Image (tube, rainbow, N blue to C red):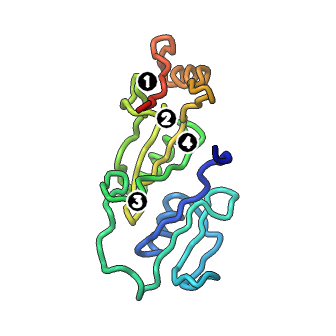
Amino acid sequence: MPPELKGLQHVGLKVRDIETAVRFYTDILGFRTNERIRYATPRGQRTAQNFMTCTGLHHVINLAMNVPEAQPDPQPPVVDSRSSVEYGLAHFAFEVEDKATFDAWEKHLRENGVELTHGPVVHSPTHPDGDGLWGENRALYFCDPDGNNIEIFCDMAIVGEDGVFDCEQHTARIRSDGYDPEKVALPELQRDEG
């Protein structure tokens, strides 16, 4: 068994136009740049890079763009990495504290002209408002200028090492959504034993 991982810490994205990408991540998502390298790195890479964060860590996103002479032939970006059949990134997700913050993010994105590619939804097979998917969380999805799909979510289910959903968290969430927890089944993990 491998050593325990703490969790996802950062995502590296190859972008077509670093200035456009930086504006999106700062102006729309509120990131800040901690370090900016233009076309030279200690390892001799020929890329422009921005190390950006929305936390106290040095970076949670690393944007990289090849030097102009090393960029691939012009091709349009993937429209939405989550719905693309191409290999590579499907999406990456940022957690927010609660439903009020989640709702504020939806409003902020819409006010800034960011089109949602999916949601807002409740990923749940048992919640009265659920979409039948797993996770027991609220989610909404949108793309950055390069088509990389981003999820903002809250209320992800807590599951114990025994594989059982945290009943108290589930009950509190169902009640806060205005439903009777006695009438909503506790979901079970979907595991493929094949």
Read off the residue under disc 1.
127
The x, y position of residue 168, in whole percent, is 61, 21
Q: Residues within 10 Å of mark 1 (few under 14, many from 20)?
A: many
| Residue designated by label 2 | 137
On screen, 78 above or below 172? Answer: below
- Where is residue 7 shown, x and y percent of the image? 62, 48
Which residue is at the front of the view, 132 or 21? 132
What element does badge 1 sit on? Answer: loop
Q: Name the N-terminal-most of marks 3 and 2.
A: 3
The picture quadrant where one finds residue 35 is bottom right
Instruction: Please state the horizontal and vertical placement of residue 183, each as a whole percent of the image.
Output: 45, 12
Q: Label 4, secondary structure: give it.
A: helix
Q: Which residue is mark 3?
A: 88
Which comes sooner in the sequence, label 3 or label 1? 3
Quadrant into which the N terminus falls: top right
Label 2 – label 4 distance at C-alpha: 14 Å
Write down the residue under mark 4.
101
Q: Is residue 193 left or right of residue 32?
A: left
Counting residues from the start of the chain, the first of labels 4 and 1 encountered is: 4
Of the two numbered discs 3 and 4 on the same chain, state the one appearing first in sequence. 3
Residue 85 as seen in the image, left or right of residue 123? left
Would residue 111 be visible to someone looking at this image? no
Q: Quadrant of residue 114?
A: bottom left
C-alpha gap between disc 3 and disc 2 = 24 Å
Residue at 30% in and 78% down: 74
First in sequence: mark 2 vs mark 4: 4
Toward the viewer: 44 or 133?
44
Amino acid at dot 2: Asn
**Is disc 3 placed on a helix, strand or loop?**
loop
Q: Is residue 185 visible?
A: yes
Front position in the image: 58 or 41: 41
